[in-house]
Amino acid sequence: MVQPGSGPTASAAASGPAWLADSVLYQVYPQAFADSDGDGIGDLAGVEQHLAYLQWLGVDTVWLNPCFVSPFHDGGYDVADYLTVAPRYGTNADLVRLVEAARARGIRILLDLVAAHTSDQHPWFLRSRDDPADHRYIWATEEAVGRPGWVASPGTRPGCYLRNFFDVQPALNFGYARPDPAEPWRQPVDGSGPLANLAALREIMTYWLDRGAAGFRVDMASSLVKDDPGLVQTSLLWRRLRGWLDRAHPDAALLSEWGDPAAAVAAGFHADFFLHFRGRAFGSLWNNRAGTHDPSWGEGSCYFDADGAGSVAEFLAEWTAADTAIDGAGQIVLPTSNHDFARLACGPRTRDQLGPAFALLLTWPALPAVYYGDEIGMRYVPGLPDKEGSAIDGIYNRAGSRTPMQWDHSARAGFSHAPQEHFYLPLDPAPDRPDVATQQADHDSLLQTVRRLIALRRRTPGLRTGGRVEVLHAGYPFVYVRGGSHLVVINPRRTPATAPVPNLAGARPLEARGVEVGASGVTAAPYSFGIFALEDAGM
């Protein structure tokens, strides 16, 4: 019988700010959430106008994708000024007002920290490209021109610079873990450039924490130190920053885009996400190879496959390994999707499967993260043009996951009063596209189901991040017990499923759709889920 989380990991109190341990995260892609000024692009005032909705839904932590000055060649992940809000979103005062208004409703705001690179329009880079004595970036001599990852100098400085993702995102210099006499540009991690950049990170974090931000999600957090086997020096860097954060801002949270929670927590982060690009923990649940998919991520079927061709075993194996390694020192974040990956409603996946998906998300001992619009079943919209760097090397296009939030059933979906041709991205053209207003009025809608599941999680300690999980059946249906007191049944396939789990007589349904339990086992209808209180907590 598999028992991930039954050891010290799940029962121990994770280190870090107490408020994070049982948060429900909600990711807002600001340019696509709500437009308050009619220019067709979402903004901070638009987010503020919908705080009542987020409070009603039950989320308590909002992560904003980058909202700083940028030429937007990568959707804002090419930052040109870390201390100034991009005019398309408003002003610094607007961000402070949003933070304060959210805090008044019991909601904290996390900002996105792009730590490993800047825009090539950042003043640091504009200076560095003309000053051979500047070491804020990684510059090589002419012999590196043409090598993968190196970009020819756009200034008077000879040679080339190292990019971190796109060519317009020069890598900040945090040093190399290994010297090489043949490559004299490899500064040590305690060189002048790396030390200047570390100091800048502290200054940026301090600036926004002093203005009320609750912490940061760090973009590409594992990519700072170069040629770093085992990411040893990168981990040391983040542990030093975490030590400073604990002393200076002990209530602040630090989350990472690392994709390896065991490594990220060991490196000093309070939490890390299971993600699509590393391992199969995330992909084996949701990735149906539609919308956004790179063949290098693997070709197996996911568990949330309507034909029932997937397996939950890969997720359980990775969860157990990460959970055991973390041993209570931090949290694993399980998202529905994100700005880089296809939504839950994508390709062949039907909306009927989304209720079971959220039942798993909100009863598993991870931090749940809801990507805006997933709670109403917004779909990945195929066939959109590249928008601000959304297309990746001709492999897939992230724009389909970044379309405007659908607030109501009007022609503009309540996103903006601008003409639709001015919208940041086109609305989903489907005539049956879901929306918040319609689903708020329907007790049986996905939105109302998600709201009830969040509320159930909040009032039920056994369903939150603490407490063990005991897997009774790792197939279709997926059956597990949380905290020794609550039974969860998940069947995301289109055919019924049964599990011979005994001693369930007297189980009381708390939120169930299509699941029946009895003395001899569980019967689950197509696309069903159920959460039950167990009368005999000693089973």
Image (spheres, rainbow, N blue to C red):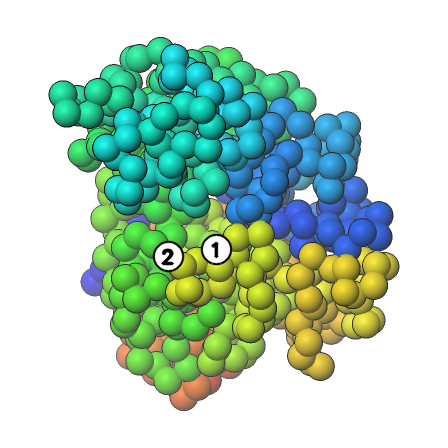
- Of the 4 image quadrants, the one containing the C terminus is bottom left
Q: Amino acid at mark 2?
A: His
Residue 112 rendering spot, x and y as whole percentages = 54, 37
Quick check: 220 above or below 519? above
N-terminal of the pair, mark 2 or mark 1, is 2
Question: Residue 68, which numbered label?
Answer: none
Instruction: Work out how far the residue at label 2 is from the one at label 1, CA to CA, in angstroms.
Output: 9 Å
Where is residue 339? Give x, y as percent: 53, 54
Q: Label 1, secondary structure: give it.
A: loop
Identify the residue at horizontal 72%, vertical 33% (top origin): 95
Looking at the image, residue 443 lies above or below residue 255:
below
Q: Which residue is outermost to the bottom? A: 495
What amino acid is found at the position of numbered circle 1 in the picture? Asp
Residue identified by numbered label 2: 276
Which quarter shows the N terminus? bottom left
Q: Nearer the viewer, residue 350 or 118?
A: 118
Residue 340: which numbered mark, if any?
A: 1
Question: Image height check: is 181 above or below 108?
Answer: above
> Which quadrant of the structure image shows residue 282?
bottom left
Q: Is residue 309 visible?
A: yes
Residue at the image point whose x is 73% and y is 42% from the top: 88
